[in-house]
Amino acid sequence: MAWPIAVKAVSGSILYSVGAFSLLAVSCLSYLLFFWNYVPVAGISREVFLIFGQGNPWAEILIDPFGGLFPNQDYELSADLVVPNSPSNIDIGPNALIISDISPLGNFMIKIDLTAASNETLITISKPAIVTYVSPLIHSIRTLVKSPFYISGMSKETERLSITFISDYAFSGGWSTTPKLARIEVESRQLRVYSLKLHIFAKLSGLRWMMYHHRFISAAIFILIFWAVELLFTTAAWIYIWSKIPSPKAKVELPRRLTREEQELINEEPVDLDSSEVDSLRLSPALGSSSRRRRPTTRLSDSSGSDMSRDR
């Protein structure tokens, strides 16, 4: 009947809707995993604390314990060095002499070693740095103008030096070739340092650039693509499996066919029936066709006991 078919359609729609929303959640999770494993961290900054002793100032720093650097990805490695504008930082070298009035411009080297997790040195770079020379007259005028800021502590007599070690450099190979540890050494014992910070920037391009800078748009596009593909295969499997399930059928009781003897008895022999049996005979579907062919003669008994015959 129509009722079992409707039950099957409603139950199928409910199960398909639940499955579709479950696949949407799976698509969101899949995109998050894809983003985590495909898009690198755009920028990593680490504060470096130099160790001063008998040799040159140095420090070792863990770049990223979670593997933020990706292989075959272009990176830029730089450092920001903040030094005071002191006389000792102007004349720097192996034979440094501090002159009271006019000092020569100082130079020094800063070296960095990048090491993999297997303690293998991947790259060693040394770059020169220089403290900007300022004449005594300019220095005096600048100090006089900025003296209120110096006195209040809003400013300091410092200089920020930016050193770029590598640019557009990719660590070729697998994950074993990405650096995990960096060792920085300032090749000058006389240099006074306020702070040192290491920066690693990823030069993103193509799909990685879009996924990083347009996260909501790319997430919507990729989630819809993942969901559409999942729904396509799920729908095909659903139709195939659902077609194999038989529909429930309602049981219909058909009237029993009369035997030949019963048919002859109805057509030929008169039957003594009371009024209730006559009414049931009229309503019987099994005898309807036979009664229409030939109406048997029935004898009805009245209240006085006399027999009355009539043709039905």
Image (spheres, rainbow, N blue to C red):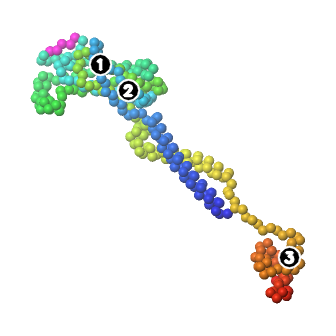
**Residue 92, position as x, y percentages in the image:** 22, 16
Q: CA distance from mark 2 to mark 1?
A: 18 Å
Q: Which residue is mark 2?
A: 63
What element does badge 3 sit on? Answer: helix
Please report contact status of discs 2 and 1: CB closer than 8 Å, yes or no: no
Q: CA distance from mark 3 to mark 1?
A: 121 Å
> Which residue is at a point 39% across and 23% down the rendered structure image?
181
Q: Amino acid at mark 2?
A: Ile
Label 1 secondary element: loop
Q: Over which residues does the magenta segment extend?
A: 95-99
Determine the secondary structure under disc 2. Answer: loop
Q: Residue furthest front?
A: 304
- Return the disc, 2 or 1, that comes first in the chain's sequence: 1
Q: Residue at x 42, y 40 (%)?
A: 211
Q: Nearer the viewer, residue 216 or 50?
A: 50
Q: Nearer the viewer, mark 2 or mark 1?
A: 1
Which residue is disc 3 drawn over? Answer: 266
Q: Is residue 94 left or right of residue 170?
A: left
The C terminus - image quarter: bottom right
Residue 61 in the image, given as x and y percentages of width and height: 35, 23
**Magenta highlight on residue 218:** no
- Which residue is rendered at x = 54% and y = 51% of the image? 18
Q: Mark 2: few, some, or many residues within 10 Å (few <14, many ≥20)? A: many
Image quadrant where residue 200 sits: top left
Residue type (three-letter) at the residue carrying disc 3: Ile
Q: Earlier in the sequence, mark 3 or mark 1?
A: 1
Q: Residue at x 24, y 24 (%)?
A: 194
Q: Residues within 10 Å of mark 3 (few under 14, many from 20)?
A: some
What numbered label is drawn on residue 51?
1
Disc 3 versus disc 2: nearer the observer: 3
Q: Quadrant of the N terminus?
A: bottom right
Amino acid type of the residue that numbered disc 1 sits on in the rendered structure:
Ile
